[in-house]
Amino acid sequence: EDRFMRNDTAYTPDVNDILATRLENPVIEQAFQTGSSFGYGELHRGERMDIQARRFEYQGKQFAIIAMQADAEAVAPITAMRNQMIIAGGGLLALVALGGVFAARTITRPITGTVTAMNQLAAGDTKVQLQGLERPDEIGDMGRSVEVFKEHAVQRLHLEERRRNDRDRER
């Protein structure tokens, strides 16, 4: 009924709180009136606290058991979990970025080289150097197919030159 603490807290080591520190807060008052309550407020430590209070009677006197925890302490596990998720997300993002770099180096560049060679070949440049012919994968297959087109283009040019030479001799 008197609202004095019946124990000493480690958070005020320089003060003996037993029957010296008075706890007054609307949450505690509500517990004395209704039996129990929960809420937030600043008590003897001057920081925001989560407060749970429950009234009980002992030898005809009204008392309240009060559980308090600093709000920052209560949300610390959530903050730690958030930070871990940010780190994990950053790690996954870095892993995906490395995968993209890997894909660009092993797939995109050789395909771009093959396409460039095909364009040069289509423009009539039969001296184009094809890359990746030794690869055992689909990119190597594409390069070998382009090599066949190149060889056919070279043969066609030789045949055309031979025909021109034959016509020139006939005249």
Image: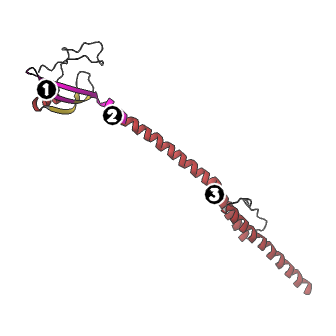
Disc 3 residue type (three-letter): Ile
The residue segment tinted magenta is 52-77
Circles 2 and 3, Cβ within 8 Å, touching? The answer is no
Report helix, strand or loop for mark 2: helix
Disc 2 residue type (three-letter): Val
- 2 or 1: tag closer to the N-terminus: 1
Q: Which mark is residue 119?
A: none
Report helix, strand or loop for mark 3: helix
**Which is closer to the viewer, label 2 or label 1?**
1
Residue denoted by label 3 = 107
Residue at 22% over, 24% down: 43
In the image, taking residue 102 as reference, residue 20 lies left or right, namely left
Report helix, strand or loop for mark 1: strand
139, above or below 19, in the image = below
- 3 or 1: tag closer to the N-terminus: 1
Residue denoted by label 2 = 75
Residue at 67% over, 60% down: 137
- Residue 120 picture location, percent across and down: 72, 67
**Which is closer to the viewer, label 3 or label 1?**
1
- Residue 108 picture location, percent across and down: 63, 58
Residue denoted by label 1 = 56
- Main secondary structure type of the part rendered in magenta: strand
Residue 32 found in image quarter: top left
